Image (tube, grey):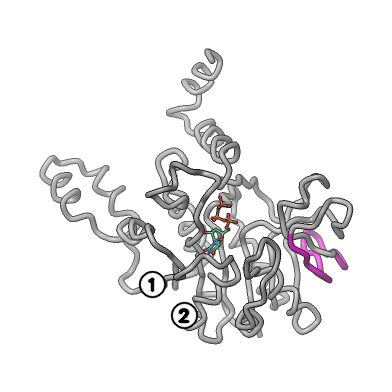
């Protein structure tokens, strides 16, 4: 019997240097794609997957995310007085049951692995999901739901993967693939940001994970990895051989919204599917 996945950790303490100056005073995770911030897409994906305990690992300048998941009394009062029922409903749509979101501070940005380790008391011995909100994935069902369905069959650890061009492997964690079963791939090794000539495959990890709590024991060692940071990939690699470990080549389209081109493409892709915008967007782009 696998233990159900009810908890998720969103590491959102990164500096977002690729998006400066936009991210100087606002978190990267609050950048909107159309009218919703990235963190909202990510939380909605988790809720769709049946997850109901959420932790954000934040840092300085990230308090605005707490406000996003809380009442905005002044706004709500004015909308009520003006009879703007639809706007009021939208402004309240991210009010989750009280106590279901908690926050912890990563006091220094020491890497993704360190951010996850900061959530160890929340994880408290349970298997959990991790999602990086700047990886926006459009898919039906959402990627986390696809992963939890696969996890419920075989248990253990999961990473979401996609096939990338070989020259791009140095931007990702890359798996050494074993046996394949449909879109589920056994993971025999994991390496962070390999040079194309050294990459064990072109199956690259994107920001969705299901992890067993033992990963915290490996993260506690605080080993410094690629880029001088404490890497989640290194701790996950240590689980291989100790526990089942699979990749799910998910169905969906992923946008790297931590990069300008990925964020722009995500906006255009979402707008192209919105009947109130699609025709006007096409016309506007045609005029550029
Ligand atoms: P990135 O590698 O995208 O780093 O982090 P970043 O700082 O957010 O952005 P750039 O590269 O400077 O533009 C991947 C994920 O890990 C989180 C980030 O918030 C993001 O969700 N992270 C990274 C932390 O929470 N803490 C860290 O110390 C590093």
Residue at numbered disc 2: 122
Residue at figure coordinates x 57%, y 75% from the top left = 128
Examine the image and state in which quarter residue 210 appears.
Answer: bottom right
Label 1 crowd (10 A; few <14 / some 14-19 / many >=20): some
User: Most extreme residue toward the left, as rendered?
Assistant: 81
Residue 154: give x, y in percent of width and height. 73, 76
Examine the image and state in which quarter residue 194 appears.
Answer: bottom right
**Image quarter for ligand 1:** bottom right
Residue 222: give x, y in percent of width and height. 62, 78
Residue at numbered disc 1: 102
Residue 242: give x, y in percent of width and height. 77, 84
Towards the viewer: 102 or 20: 20
Q: Quadrant of the C terminus?
A: top right
Residue at figure coordinates x 17%, y 44% from the top left = 79
Residue at figure coordinates x 57%, y 78% from the top left = 4
Could you tell me how far apart the alpha carbons at marks 1 and 2 are, in whole angstroms? 9 Å
Q: Which residues are magenta?
A: 177-192
Residue 179: give x, y in percent of width and height. 87, 67
Q: Quadrant of the N terminus?
A: bottom right
Towards the viewer: 152 or 159: 159
Q: Is residue 140 magenta?
A: no
Residue at figure coordinates x 18%, y 55% from the top left = 73
């Amino acid at each position: 019997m696998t233990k159900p996945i009810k908890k998720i950790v969103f590491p959102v303490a990164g500096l977002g240097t690729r998006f400066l100056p936009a991210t100087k005073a606002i978190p990267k995770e609050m950048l909107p794609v159309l009218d919703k911030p990235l963190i909202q897409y990510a939380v909605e994906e988790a809720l769709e997957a049946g997850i109901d305990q959420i932790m954000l690992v934040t840092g300085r300048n990230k308090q605005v995310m707490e406000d996003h998941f809380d009442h905005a009394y002044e706004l709500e009062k004015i909308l009520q007085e003006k009879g703007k029922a639809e706007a009021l409903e939208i402004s309240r749509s991210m009010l989750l049951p009280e106590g279901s979101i908690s926050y912890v501070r990563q006091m220094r940005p020491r890497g993704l692995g360190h951010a996850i380790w900061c959530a160890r008391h929340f994880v408290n011995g349970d298997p959990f999901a991790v999602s990086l909100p700047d990886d926006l994935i459009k898919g039906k069902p959402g990627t986390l739901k696809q992963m939890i369905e696969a996890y419920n069959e075989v248990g253990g650890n999961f990473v979401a993967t996609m096939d990338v061009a070989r020259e791009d492997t140095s931007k990702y964690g890359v798996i050494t693939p074993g046996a394949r079963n449909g879109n589920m791939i056994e993971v025999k090794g994991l390496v962070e940001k390999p040079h194309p000539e050294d990459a064990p495959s072109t199956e690259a990890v994107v920001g969705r994970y299901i992890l067993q709590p033992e990963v915290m024991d490996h993260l506690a060692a605080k080993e410094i990895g690629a880029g001088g940071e404490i890497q989640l990939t290194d701790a996950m690699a240590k689980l291989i051989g100790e526990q089942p470990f699979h990749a799910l080549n998910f169905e969906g389209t992923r946008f790297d919204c931590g990069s300008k081109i990925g964020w722009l493409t995500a906006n255009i892709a979402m707008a192209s599917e919105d009947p109130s915008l699609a025709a006007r967007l096409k016309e506007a782009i045609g005029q550029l």
